Structures are given as structure tokens and as C-alpha cells.
């Protein structure tokens, strides 16, 4: 099992300068390495029987650039640019590994035939993290002792351990990252023991959840949770701060101060949303042994006119958090195809066509309930096929509750 714990760091002003310098040097190295790869790609993609209408590079075609060739050139880089000698070697190699993964995602399609976007050149400040791949080993560049993190060529940094590291877990790597309110360290923890998953015959309660924009989610037993809309609630504050930023001279001290205020507001909204997601995930996992959810193509939905609301609720982030919480508690989650769940009647199975604006499901069989509730019941039925779950096999023969029961209000005040 893999976990990631993030803690706040308290570096000295001198250490902050070193961390920022490392980020800038790694950014330049990223751009140079990416330029090498793109140059090789342009020179080898020119047709030999025709000329380009615009221009093509001429001269000797360079050797193919990959991770191994670029990593072997690190020694030459340190000879030409002595500043790179002050960066721990593993951090430079990890920087090239990140580029190699991004490059392969762009050129090599996955099992579904999809590829990632082309790697981009980084602007100043874009690379705000670097990784020490080994921790607490003889040749490691990072060592953790109590609440002190000792980094090679940087020194000892105080760590705010707001929660203890779980017993039995080994720290595999440490990633130093910068946020608007300071520096953090993310520890990747590994426990090699495999937890026993919950057997099917021990499932005592199950539900389906339908996520939406009017209500954050609705369960198969008629309970719903309100949409918090943290970003929309902060829009007026962000607009005011960004207007102030637009009046500043780009690159000035006042510009940097105001840009930090804008970044802090965005960070606050992201943390509010994440805390809300964890509250809802723990509430669901405490109540059910099996949670059936819908597999949504969120990237496609985010291209519609509802993009701002969809990105504000962040369904994808919530579903990932919910699955992670369920794994820690040795419970089950199941994703199913959502097609037809809002149209088919959960009582008789008849198709009831309706537009997105119609929020009530009314069927000729006499079932009149909320549209999202009906969809959640269909998700549960679809995900519980063949499972001996109490109350799920005969779900279609029972009438759902007349009234909705709302969860406790989980809107975060902080």
C-alpha cells in the first residue's frame, strides 16, 4: 500500500534561496533537454522527397535524445555550468525522468489510443518541486530524524509533523515543493503488507451515488449533499484582487506581493474543496460497505457551457479520494457505466425520456421521485448484479422513501 503524507517546512532564509535556485536551474535544464528532443524530432520527420513550404533545419542530424543519453551528459553539464554541481545528482536525474515520462505520454498512446499533450517549455517559477528518490538509506540524499529533515547540500530543515507517520510504513522518497504560503515536503510511504479486501459475502450495506451540480451527490436511499461552490463564493474576492494585480507594473515588488495574494486565495479555495471531499468520503465509507459510482468522462463534460460549475465541484478528485479512503478501511468501491441510469425507471425499467432541465422522474408505473435519486438507485442495481447484498436484489419491487433525508451540512467554514 502506498500513502502520501505532506508536511510544512520551516527553512531558514538562506535555505529558501537555495531551494529557489535549485528550482530555477532545474527549469533551465528541463528546457534545454526538451529542446534537444524536439530538435531531433523535427530533423527526423522531414520527408526526403519533398521540401517544406516554410522551413526545415539543415545540417547533421543529431543522435536521438532519450533519458539515458541526457543523464550521461550531466557530468558535461556540471563542467560547463559549475552551478549545477551544487544540486544533488539524484534530483537532476529525477527532473529528466519527469521529462521522459511526459515525452512518452505524448508520443505513445495508451490502451485506449489516447495520448497526452506535448511537453512545454517552462517559464520562470513553473518548476517548484524536486524529488529525492531515496530516504534514510546509506546513499540517500534525504534523512528524516524526528521532526528534522536533513537534505544533501541544503542542510537540516524543521518539519511540522502535524500527524505521526504510520508504523510499519517505509519512507520511499521525499518531494520538496513550493506553494503560495511556503515550502512543503511530501513523503511517499510504502507498506509491503497487502491488506485483506472485504469478501463479497460480508457486505452488509451498499449504495449507489449519483453526482451532480444541483446536489453534490445523491445516494440510493434518497440522501443528498449540498453543493458548496467554493470557487463561485470567492469569485468577487478574486476579481477584486486580480484587478489590483492588473494595475501593477509587471515584475515589480508590488506586483509580486499582489500575485502572492491571488495565489493564496486560489490555494484557500482548493483546500476548502479538498477538505469537503474528505468529509463526504469518510461519511460514505462509515455508512456503507460497497459504494457504486458512475464512471464519467469529466474532461469532455468540462468542455460544455457548464465547465465552471463542473470544475468547481471536482467530481474526479472526489472519486479518487473516496476510493483511497475505502481502500484504507478495507471496503469496496465499484465504477459502472452511467449510460441510461437517469432515463430508465428504477422501479419497472421503462425508459422515460427527459431533458436535463427536468429534475423529477415521473413514470407510468406510479414512481415519482427526484431524477438524481432514480439514477443512484439504477447505479446500485447495475453494480450489485450477482452480489448477495441484503436489500439490493429486490430493490426494483420496493417503493423508495417519500421524502429525502439530507446529510449533515458539510460546507466548510475555513
Image (tube, grey):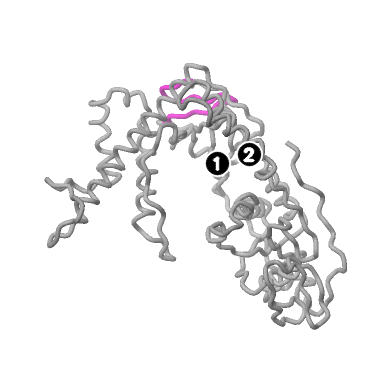
**Label 2 crowding class (10 Å Cα cut-off): few <14, some 14-19, many 20+?**
few
Q: Nearer the viewer, residue 164 or 50?
A: 50
Q: Nearer the viewer, residue 315 or 148?
A: 315
Contact? badges 2 and 1 (CB < 8 Å):
yes
Q: Is residue 57 left or right of residue 146?
A: left
Is residue 275 within the magenta segment?
no
Q: Earlier in the sequence, mark 2 or mark 1?
A: 2
Is residue 145 within the magenta segment?
yes
- Residue furthest to the right in view is 402
Q: CA distance from mark 2 to mark 1?
A: 9 Å
> Is 84 located above or below residue 273 in the figure?
above
State the residue position of label 2: 166
Q: Is residue 121 left or right of residue 190?
A: left
Q: Secondary structure at mark 2?
A: loop
Quadrant of the image containing the C terminus: top right
**Label 1 crowding class (10 Å Cα cut-off): few <14, some 14-19, many 20+?**
many
State the residue position of label 1: 189
Location of residue 110 in the rendering, given as x and y in whole percent from the top left corner? 41, 61
Amino acid at each position: 500500500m502506498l500513502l502520501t503524507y505532506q508536511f510544512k517546512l520551516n527553512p531558514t532564509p538562506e535555505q529558501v534561496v537555495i531551494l529557489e535556485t535549485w528550482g530555477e536551474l532545474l527549469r533551465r535544464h528541463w528546457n534545454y533537454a526538451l529542446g534537444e528532443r524536439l530538435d531531433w524530432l523535427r530533423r527526423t520527420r522531414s520527408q526526403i522527397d519533398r521540401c517544406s513550404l516554410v522551413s526545415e533545419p539543415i545540417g547533421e542530424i543529431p543522435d536521438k535524445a532519450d533519458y539515458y543519453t541526457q543523464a550521461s551528459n550531466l557530468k558535461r553539464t556540471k563542467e560547463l555550468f559549475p552551478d549545477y554541481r551544487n544540486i544533488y545528482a539524484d534530483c537532476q536525474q529525477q527532473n529528466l525522468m519527469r521529462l521522459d515520462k511526459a515525452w512518452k505520454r505524448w508520443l505513445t498512446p495508451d490502451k485506449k489510443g489516447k495520448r497526452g499533450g506535448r511537453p512545454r517549455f517552462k517559464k520562470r517559477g513553473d518548476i517548484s518541486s524536486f524529488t529525492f528518490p531515496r530516504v534514510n538509506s546509506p546513499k540517500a540524499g534525504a534523512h528524516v530524524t524526528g521532526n528534522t529533515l536533513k537534505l544533501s547540500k541544503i542542510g537540516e530543515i524543521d518539519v511540522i509533523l502535524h500527524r505521526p507517520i504510520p508504523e510499519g510504513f517505509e519512507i520511499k522518497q521525499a518531494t520538496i515543493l513550493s506553494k503560495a504560503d511556503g515550502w512543503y515536503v511530501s513523503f511517499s510511504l510504502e507498506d509491503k503488507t497487502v491488506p485483506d479486501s472485504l469478501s463479497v459475502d460480508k457486505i452488509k450495506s451498499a449504495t449507489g451515488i449519483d453526482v451532480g451540480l444541483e446536489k453534490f451527490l445523491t445516494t440510493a436511499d434518497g440522501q443528498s449533499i449540498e453543493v458548496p461552490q467554493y470557487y463561485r463564493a470567492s469569485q468577487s474576492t478574486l476579481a477584486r484582487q486580480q484587478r489590483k494585480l492588473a494595475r501593477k507594473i509587471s515584475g515589480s515588488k508590488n506586483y509580486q506581493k499582489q500575485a502572492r495574494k491571488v495565489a493564496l486565495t486560489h490555494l484557500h479555495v482548493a483546500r476548502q474543496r479538498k477538505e469537503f471531499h474528505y468529509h463526504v468520503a469518510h461519511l460514505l465509507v462509515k455508512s456503507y460497505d460497497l459504494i457504486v459510482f458512475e464512471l464519467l468522462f469529466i474532461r469532455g463534460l468540462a468542455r460544455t457551457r457548464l465547465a465552471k460549475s463542473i470544475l468547481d465541484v471536482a467530481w474526479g478528485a472526489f472519486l479518487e479520494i473516496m476510493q483511497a479512503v475505502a481502500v484504507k478501511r478495507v471496503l469496496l468501491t465499484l465504477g459502472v457505466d452511467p449510460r441510461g441510469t437517469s432515463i430508465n425507471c428504477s422501479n419497472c425499467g421503462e425508459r422515460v425520456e427527459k431533458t436535463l432541465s427536468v429534475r423529477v422522474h415521473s413514470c407510468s408505473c406510479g414512481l415519482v421521485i427526484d431524477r438524481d435519486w432514480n439514477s443512484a438507485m439504477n447505479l446500485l442495481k447495475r453494480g450489485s448484479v450477482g452480489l448477495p447484498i441484503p436489500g439490493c436484489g429486490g430493490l426494483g419491487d420496493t417503493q423508495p422513501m417519500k421524502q429525502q433525508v439530507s446529510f449533515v451540512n458539510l460546507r466548510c467554514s475555513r
